[in-house]
Structure formats: C-alpha cells, structure tokens
Image (cartoon, helix red, strand yellow):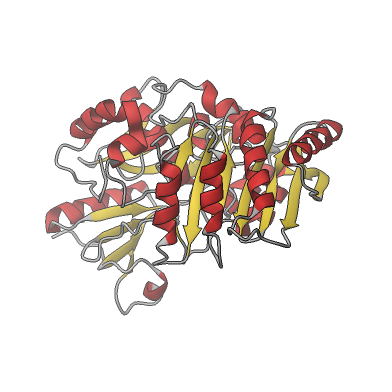
Amino acid sequence: MIDLTALDILSPGSPGYEASPKSRLVVRCHSVSNVVQVMAYAAETGQRMVPRGGGHCFVDRCPVDGIVVDLSGMDRIAVDENDVATIGAGARLGAVYAALHGCGRTIPAGCGDTVGIAGLTLGGGIGLLGRQYGLTCDRLVGAQVVLADRSVVECDEHRDSDLFWALRGAGGGQFGIVTELRFATVPEPSVCRIDGRWSEPGKLIEGRWTESSKLIEAWQDWAPDAPDGMTVNLHVQAGHARLFGVSTLPPAQTRELLREFTARAGVLYAIDIRLDVPYSMVKPTFSAIGPAATSRGRSEFFARAMSECTVGELLKGLTGNRRLAFTAMGGAYNRVAEAATAFAHRGERFLLEQVGDPGDPWVDEAWHQAHEEGSGRVYPNFPDLALEDPAQAYHAGNFPRLAALKKSYDPHRVFDFPQAL
C-alpha cells in the first residue's frame, strides 16, 4: 500500500480541514513527485480524484468520497531573460500580477486576486486586457502535465502539440494534472481606469427600467466594436448600473470614446477616469464587482445584439440582488481561428451572465428569455449543469477532436466529473 503520511494531508478532524473542500482526503502537493504519488495512491485504492488550483469553479467538482489534489503548494513564479513567465499551477492571480509587476510585465487575465491561474488559463481566460492581447490561454507557450498513466510531459507547439492545443480552452482537469504553465508576457501598461455609476430614479408602469434599457442597447452596439485598447463592461441591477474597465489608449481618445457612448445611450452618465495607473494596481479595485461566492449564475455568449423586446423582458425581472453582467468580447479574442485552440468561441460580441441568489428561479427564467437570441455557446470557465448539450455549448466544432484526444490521453477516464469530455 502506498503511504501518504509524509505528505501535507488534510482529512476530517485535522487542522485546516474545515476551510478546505469537503472530500475524504485533501492532499496539498508541493512538487510534481507529490502529485505522482497521490495519483498512484488513488489508482491503488480506486478513489476518484480531482485537481484543485484555485477554488472558484461555479460547480463543486470535489468528490465527497475521493481525493482533492490541492496544488496550492506549487506557486513558484519566475520570469526569464526572454520575458517568459513560468508559473506553478497553484499560484493565484494576485500573486501573479504582483510578481510580474516587479519585472515590468503582465499577462491578460481576470480580476479576482484569489482566482487560480491554472483553472483560468485552461478554460480560456477573459480579462480587461483581453481585447488587446487575447485570452490568457492565447499567451500560454508551454505546460508541464502529469498524465493519467502518471508520466510527466512537457507540452508546447512542438512536443505533444495535440495536448497543448487541448489545454488552451478545454484543459481543466480533463487530460491530466497541469503542474506548471509558461506564458509569453507583455509589457505592463499604464492604463486609464474607467468607472461610471448611475441610478435611475423611476420606473414605467409596465415595469420597465427605460434608461437601463437605453444603456444596454447602446453598450451592445458600442463596446464590442471599441478599439482593442479599450475594454468596458456593464453590470445592471434594479434601478442602477455600473460601467467599468480600462483603456490603454491616450486619455483624450479614451474620453472621446466614452462621450460617444453616453451620446448613444442618451442619458446623463458621470464617468470617473483615473490616468496612468499601473495595470496590476487597477485589477484589485475591480475584484469585488464579480458575483458573491453564494450567488448562482448562468451565462451565454452572443454573436449579435439582443432585441429591444428581449432587453425589456430581462429588465422587468430585476429586483433585489439580481444582476445582468455584460462582458465585451471582439478585438484580439476574435482574431484567432476557432480551430487554432480548443477555445472555440472566436466570433462572439459579448458574454451575458444572469446572476441571483441561490434558488432564485429568475436565473433560469432570464437565461431562457435571452437564450432565444444567444449563440448557444457557453464559456467553459462558467460551467452550467442545466445545459442540455454541454459538449456543443462549451466546445462547438472542436468537440470531436477533443473527444478523440480524451480517449487517447485518458482512455480509462481517470479524470472524470459531470460534463467531462
């Protein structure tokens, strides 16, 4: 029997377990050899296992009767003379941005400081620099992976290139346990921080937030077509909205583009612009905008603007903590061919999330209202167990190739979970 007692183990009753995933066993790995050892133990005992880099997945994939391979002890970050960053799979975004800032570099990624770099990258990686530099996975140039047979491989465009293709958009816990990632970094820009907050004082008798409707309609037509250097997203709740993002464009051009938006919207909208802020310093200021850990959400990409009627129906249901969250796509996201990486959603204009309290039926109702005009595609990092055809939603035309690679790299489904390939 393989002995794990020398490893960093959390189990029911041990210190720190209450703050960990509620699986039978959580093993915090500090090296690749630790990962291999845990995988061998799982194979010997017949237990399910899942890797855990961050902990922000919208679906709880931690097996109650299995093993969580916690990678948080593998968080080394280093940048070489070619500006390639080697980052351990357990690193979180806050630490990544801080370390890269010290070298004058960054990567396009998300806002939450505690989001894991591995999960974000392997599912795509949308962020405020993405319209200029692409997805986080578009900057990935190599990865170290422990495969289902416990062999350790280095993959990139030249070595295990099929696996490297799959990791860029469909790699989260599917083909192996990624232990290290390598990124081609970009110079860290100084940006204009954009933040506009607005409240609507009244509501029409038929229940429609009229000025919110104007904001959404104007944003749909404007934000996805803005210059690559500007990313502006929109969140709408009952009677108020928030416009936020960054611009690497000159301040005068940034102001002119925002004036163009407010003119389209036809509403008075005060927008705060802070100039010459290091990008890494902006990210934490937006980290609290995302949904709370206790929220429930559904989402879909849109390749065209929603109709005025659909927008009106969505707004009628906004009460309490319910929220519509719009994320601009376009730009560099869409200049990569659909089949070039496993991330297939390269022709979308925006992503819409419907977010509410747990158990709120409005989330499903609003999703179905919007779905009639959506593209049918869903961001892999926002898994949704209610989808009727998840393979098509997450992977579109790339699914057949991914399914074949799954059989090749993991024929016995060592890595398995609801909606796995």
Residue at left offset 51%, top offset 59%: 317
Q: Farthest residue in the bottom direction?
A: 13
- Choose between 105 and 224: the one closer to the eye: 224
Q: Position of residue 33 (x, y in %)?
A: 32, 48
Q: Farthest residue in the front direction?
A: 205
Q: Position of residue 106 (x, y in %)?
A: 64, 38
Horizontally, residue 153 falls left or right of residue 73, namely left
Q: Decide: is 148 above or below 111.
A: above
Does residue 127 appear in this view? yes
Q: Position of residue 170 (x, y in %)?
A: 36, 37
Quadrant of residue 394 within the rendered picture: top left
- The quarter in which the C terminus is drawn is top left
Q: Farthest residue in the right direction?
A: 252
Residue at left offset 67%, top offset 44%: 214
Horizontally, residue 49 falls left or right of residue 249, namely left
Quadrant of residue 160 within the rendered picture: top left
Q: Position of residue 216 (x, y in %)?
A: 63, 44
Horizontally, residue 79 falls left or right of residue 366, namely right
- Choose between 395 and 211: the one closer to the eye: 211
Q: Decide: is 348 above or below 318.
A: above
